[in-house]
Structures are given as structure tokens and as C-alpha cells.
Amino acid sequence: MLHTLDEEPRLEEAFENLRLIRETMDRSTKHSSLSGFAGLLVGVWAIAGVLVTRFCIFGNDSLVLRPGHVWPLAAVWMAVLFVSILTDFLMNKRAAAAVGKHVFSSLGARLAQAAAPAFTAGLALTGYLLANGMVAHIWGYWMLFYGLSICSVGLFSVKPVSFLGWAFVLAGAITLFLSPIAGLWMMAVTFGGFHICYGAFTGASRGEW
């Protein structure tokens, strides 16, 4: 009986330690996704990229990639990618500072490692498609590989991140069977609309603006 009474404080201490560890792990993943404002802004940048692509690069032409279109198209979407990554970095840095953490962490390294294979494969395929004038297929592949990257990141993050990744994968699979112009507008729906919806949901439900 004395042994049992002596063990009770130790059990309570062990359960308390487990609770603290779980809360720490939850906080570690809580800020591992796009903040609300970051999601909204990334969506806006993507829609801007679609509009520039449609009306400035291709104009009244059907989306047939001609030699003069390759570099402008690559420049527009590299700019969208750069601004989106910068936005995500600055917003996550702000969120991390608000809770006394650093944006560069072991969790951040794992997220980058998880996303890298699909992201790298997407870049390689993009170069191949552009070099061969196959822009008709590029939009769906971008969605597929981006979705796969997000799904990988979702393994270390909150559930909505995985849902976002799967939404991109499914949309990309559908886009492969659409016309080039419909595929471009799907870019606005997915990279634009999905990110905006995700940002609004994250900000409203979790207060992570």
C-alpha cells in the first residue's frame, strides 16, 4: 500500500510531462503552414500571373507556345513563385516571432526535405515541356506536383494542409484532360482560389492571420 501511494505522485508527474510534450509538439506544427494573410496574398499573386499570361503574353492567340513566348512565360511564373515564397517566409517569420520561435528550425528543415522531391521533379518537367512547346499540358502538371509537395508537408503539419494538397492533386488530374485555355483558368481557380480559401479558413478558424 505504501508503495502504491509513493508511486501516485510519480505517475501524475509522468502524465503532466506527457501533456507538456504533446502541447509542445502541437505548437511546433501549428505554425508550419501558410498563415491567413500569406494564403490570401499567394492566391492574389497567382491570379495576377494568370491574367498576365493570358492577356500580355498570349494576347488573342490560342495558347500555342511559340519561341517568343518561352522566356516571358518562364519569367512571369518565376516571379510569381519568388514573390509567393518571399510572402510565405515573411509571414511565417512574423508568426514565429510572435510565439518566441525561429522560422529556421528542425521542423522547417523536415518540411523542406519533404517538399523537395516533388518540387524538383515539377521544375524538371517544366523545363522539358517548355523546351518542347508543350504548354497545353503544363498547368495540370504544376497542380499535380505542387499538390504532392503539399501532401508531403501535410505529414508534419495540420490536417487542412493535407486537404489542400489533395485538392491540388485532384484538380491537376482533371486539368490534364482540359483544353489549354481551360487549364490556364484552372490555374486561377487552384493556385488563386484554393490559396485564398485556405488563407481565409486558417485566419477565421485558427486566428493565424
Image (cartoon, helix red, strand yellow):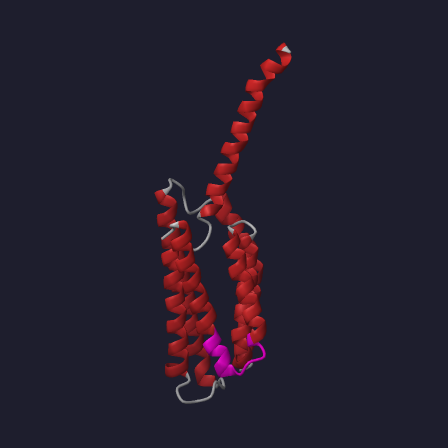
Task: From the viewer's perspective, tell me whether residue 94 is left or right of residue 132.
Answer: left
In this view, 47 is above or below 120: below
Image quarter where the N terminus lies is top right
Q: Can residue 40 be seen from the camera position used here?
A: yes
Residue 134: image x %, image y %? 55, 81
Residue 16: image x %, image y %? 52, 28
Tell me what residue is drawn at x 40 percent, y 89 percent.
60
- Where does the magenta region start and end? 175-186
Q: Picture quarter containing residue 99?
A: top left
Say if the magenta span includes residue 5. no
Tell me what residue is drawn at x 51 percent, y 82 percent.
180
Residue 90: image x %, image y %? 36, 54
Q: Can residue 124 be seen from the camera position used here?
A: no
What secondary structure is the magenta-colored segment mainly?
Answer: helix
Return the residue nearer the eye: 4 or 100.
Answer: 4
Q: Picture quarter containing residue 192?
A: bottom left
Tell me what residue is drawn at x 57 percent, y 51 percent.
155
Q: How many marks?
A: 0
Tell me what residue is drawn at x 40 percent, y 41 percent.
101
In this view, 107 is above or below 189: above
Task: From the viewer's perspective, tell me whether residue 178 is left or right of residue 200.
Answer: right
- Outermost top residue: 2
Return the residue nearer the eye: 2 or 70.
Answer: 2
Residue 150: image x %, image y %? 53, 59
Return the residue nearer the eye: 38 or 134.
Answer: 38
